[in-house]
Image (cartoon, rainbow, N blue to C red):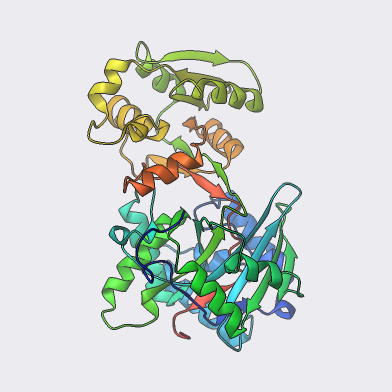
Amino acid sequence: MNTSGPAGQGLRLIPFRGLRYVPERVSSLAAVTSPPYDVVVRPDGLHHLESADPYNIVRLILPQADTAPARHQQAAQTLKHWLSEGVLAPDSEPSLYVYEQRNAEILQRGVVGALALSAPADGIVLPHEDVMAHVVEDRADLMRTTAAHLEPLLLTYRSDDDGPGATAVIERTTDRPPLLATTTEDGYHHRLWAVTDPADRAEIETDLARHQALIADGHHRWATYLRLQQEHTAPGPWDFGLVLLVDTARYPLRVRAIHRLLHRLPVADALAALDDLFRIRDLDVPLPMALDALAEAAAEGNAFLLAGDGGFHLVDRPDPALLSRTIRADRPAAWQALDATVLHSVLLDHIWRIPDAPEHIAYIHDTAAAVEQAERHGATAVLMHPVREEVVRDLARQGVTMPRKSTSFGPKPATGLVLRSLDLD
């Protein structure tokens, strides 16, 4: 995505002194990393990460205590303790960081740095999803208490040529030995390099200043950055946020769906409420084949896959009259046609009348985990088909946000490879 605004109105990325694990103090770098906080499937995934290594980063991003203030204070104390013990240590000089993720199918490279914050109205960093106030409040309390950015957001931009710029620096940098290299249990190989040469940094910064970015992952953390910036009126480190910027013209991302787990709605009740309003077909097939059927139906219109009773139920072809009276007419047609729009406006708000609160709805990235949890607890999993990236970008350009948790871009950066302490900047 390119900017068309005046020079100097694009992305401003500056170096910082990254906090990194000292390899000799942990069992392995892989054992102390984590997916982003909102991807960890709790409690199973949380317990798995906590047991991987006593210094796993999940103890900072998802601390466990009886109250929110106690959790955040525990994270701050843990961070302070790890720094004093030498488990984490700051790099000797400010750097931008080149970060690479690779597996057998995908290669992703980008630049990690501290990005100047900007409001959506500025058109520099574009959100595409709504956020939930309670999540922003929780993340703000955690960042405020720890005075740290514990995991980078994933932002994308699109370069317009292969000439000098950030991508050229990235390619040159990856020819050198990395600062760190590790392979996480999901099969991804991770490498990180520091970019300290002033000429290389200037080349990156000049290039990025011509572009705008789309928030691919981290809307709640971006909203948190903006909230905390407003609390600090004097210029300083709170004016910048930790991000990973990826040029998707060179390294395309994958877009996946985020599924819903409806804690208090049994599948039978969910289906009964949809009778005569949607077409419902029961599928006696394994999950992969059910997802294929969902994809085929989604190509024709709105479609969802309900699970939780041991089977799969394909729900599609909503009543047009139902859509017209329950979906806002003051939004673009592409927004009105989104599965997430129909799910939230029609199913959750109008038919099932389920409040969008944690005690009623969980958002789960992993398809099998959503089905398993629904079956275990007598709940309903609503499985979604991913939206196309070009739809996301077009709506973001129009300043239109999608319903929260509409997309999952990836691969997401591993949490724990580089952190930002605001006390050091």
Give the percent coordinates (x, y) of residue 409.
53, 48
Q: How many marks?
A: 0
Q: Would residue 64 be found to the left or right of residue 283 on screen?
A: left
Where is 244 relative to 316, above or below?
below
Q: Would residue 418 be found to the left or right of residue 388 on screen?
A: right
Where is 396 relative to 96, above or below?
above
**298 or 203: nearer the eye?**
203
Give the percent coordinates (x, y) of residue 422.
44, 80
Q: Quadrant of the C terminus?
A: bottom left
Identity of the residue drawn at 46% across and 43% down:
363
**347 or 213: nearer the eye?**
213
The answer to whether any part of residue 278 appears in the image is yes
Q: Would residue 249 be found to the left or right of residue 224 on screen?
A: right
Quarter of image, res 223: bottom left
Give the percent coordinates (x, y) of residue 191.
70, 67
Quarter of image, res 6: bottom left
Give the percent coordinates (x, y) of residue 199.
59, 82
Q: Would residue 37 be found to the left or right of residue 220 on screen?
A: right
Quarter of image, res 418: bottom right
**32 or 384: nearer the eye?**
384
The answer to whether any part of residue 129 appears in the image is no
Identity of the residue drawn at 56% across and 21% down:
296
**265 or 393: nearer the eye?**
393
